[in-house]
Amino acid sequence: MIDCREAVRRMWTYLDEALEAKPAEEFEAHLLTCQRCCGELEFNRQMRDVVAEREGTPPMPDELRSRIDLLLAGAEGMKGGAA
Ligand SMILES: [Zn+2]
């Protein structure tokens, strides 16, 4: 039987379906007895789906967006010819 640390270590490999049969079996056996890891797997699975859906169109971080807004605002000001 593997412990939580080992289960967490295998989690992403499991989600990638890259885990060997035996470690995968041990991992699944742990999930049956461990609510915490079971919840974590569900969470990670959803995270993974969200990331997969957004692939190709990465979300723009708010900080970058606001910086671009500032740049655009600055460019507008220059065009207006403040001096
Ligand atoms: Zn666990």
Image (cartoon, helix red, strand yellow):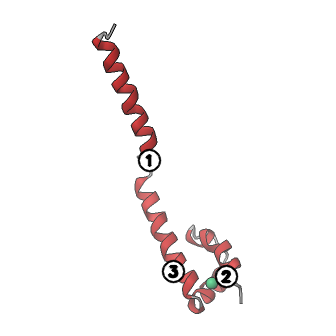
Outermost residue to the left: 80
Ligand 1's quadrant is bottom right
Does 21 sit above or below residue 47?
below
Q: Position of residue 72 (x, y in %)?
A: 35, 26
Q: Amino acid at mark 2?
A: Cys
- Asked which secondary structure carries label 2, the reply is helix
Q: Are marks 3 and 1 in contact (CB under 8 Å)?
A: no
Residue type at mark 3 is Gly
Residue shown at 57% from the left, 67% from the top: 16
Kindly tell me whether mark 1's CB lies below 8 Å from ligand 1.
no
| Residue 5 placement: quadrant | bottom right
- Name the residue carrying label 2: 4
In front here: 73 or 13? 73
In the rendered image, which quarter contains the C terminus? Answer: top left
Which residue does the numbered mark 1 point to in the structure image? Answer: 58
Label 1 and label 2: CA atoms lie apart by 32 Å
**Label 3 Cα neighbours within 10 Å, binned few <14 / some 14-19 / many ≥20:** few
* Residue 69: quadrant of the picture: top left
33 versus 23 height, above or below: below
Cα distance in 3D space between marks 3 and 1: 26 Å
Question: Which amino acid type is shown beneath numbered disc 1?
Answer: Pro
Residue at disc 3, secondary structure: helix
Alpha carbon separation for disc pair 3 and 2: 12 Å
At x 64%, y 80%, the residue is: 24
Considering only order in the chain, which callout, 2 or 1, is on the residue closer to the N terminus?
Answer: 2
For label 3, the residue is: 39
Q: Nearer the viewer, residue 46 or 62?
A: 62
Instruction: Specify whether tag 2 is near ligand 1 (CB below 8 Å).
Output: yes
Q: Earlier in the sequence, mark 3 or mark 1?
A: 3
